[in-house]
Image: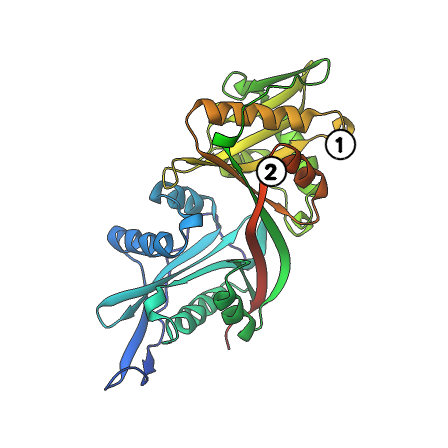
Amino acid sequence: MQLSRRTDHVETRSPPYVLQAFYHRPVEIEVRPAKTRDEEQLSLELHNAVWPLAAVTMAEVDSFKHGALAYTDRLAWLGSEPVGSGFASIRPQRPHVAHAAITVLPAHRRRGAGTALHCALSAWSAEHGLEALETVVEEDDAENLAFAGRRGFVEIERNGRMILELADVEPTLVAAPAGVEIVTWAERPELDRGIYDVAVEAYADVPGAEREEMEPFADWLAHDMRGSGDLPEATFVAVAGDEVVGYAKFSLTAAQPTTAFHDMTGVKRAWRGLGIAGALKRAQIAWAKGRGYDRLVTSNELRNEPIRRLNAALGYRAAPGRVLLRGPLAP
């Protein structure tokens, strides 16, 4: 089935789910599309309230939607009260599976809202010719891991989180190897094609990334480098003569203004093992410290030992990470 890059707002109404427990009379959980801007904002507020470590702004949601092949945003209602939200998208990097996020307020769990949202997102995915959902769960979230496990979801990737508290470090700039200069993309905007060349090699070598498709240059530039949280001045580039040999970028969000998130650190294969990634990381640490950030957060697939060793050497400490799960659509 061919899908347009234009975002898809064609919705189907989900059937209500009638619940007996906890009530003196049947009460319906109803899942409806978030059609208005206020409803989209409500969906986001529910997400941020339940998942503060993944909180984002509406500008970032808009940017994400713009880059998706298709998406749906749903709200779960218990009478007139919103109790949860569900979001599913089809991304150009992984067009054969829908990525889903289900949120239910803790006080309203075990009443059918999560099941109703799962069914609604599954029906939407089936309409788009897909047969599976992927979702991310915090690895210390036993309740939601169990919810997913009961529905047939299995782990396909585990990403460990590492955190650097900037109050605990004194930045030290270590020179890049001889002949290599560290600049910002803001200083050298013409380096965008060279950064892409690094990304083509680096993305392919990240464990788990073999499932993803590399986008053409223009699409990659729009989706990976020009989102609302992507700043040229927060993107560091290693240049050797006229060749871009590595880069490292942050993803920033006003929803978490004191935290900077490492998005990607990549070095061309022929230039690895020379200290370029370390020089890029130290440039990032100095930049964030100088601009008043409190902490840096990175998430790396557990098989990606080189970058995890580098982070540990720089003072990052392990924290509970995230698990990528894949499962079947609801029947």
Residue 187: x, y in percent? Answer: 51, 16
User: Is disc 1 surrounded by few (<14), some (14 to 19) or many (20+) residues within 10 Å?
Assistant: few
| Disc on res. 216 | 2
Kindly identify the amino acid type of the residue bearing the numbered disc 2: Pro
- Residue occupying image coordinates x 67% and y 38%: 307
308 above or below 279?
Answer: below
Q: Which dot, 1 or 2, sits closer to the camera?
A: 1
Front-most of residues 6 and 299? 299
Image quadrant where one finds the N terminus: bottom right
The answer to whether 50 appears left or right of 22 in the picture is right
User: Is disc 2 surrounded by few (<14), some (14 to 19) or many (20+) residues within 10 Å?
Assistant: few
The secondary element bearing badge 2 is classed as: loop
The answer to whether 50 appears left or right of 223 in the picture is left
The answer to whether 201 appears left or right of 59 in the picture is right
Query: What residue is shown with label 1?
Result: 269
The disc, 1 or 2, on the residue closer to the chain's N-terminal end is: 2
| Disc on res. 192 | none
Q: How many marks?
A: 2
Q: Quadrant of residue 244?
A: top right
The secondary element bearing badge 1 is classed as: helix
The answer to whether 207 appears left or right of 83 in the picture is right
Residue 126 at least partly seen: no
Front-most of residues 171 and 308? 171
Residue 199: x, y in percent? Answer: 64, 34
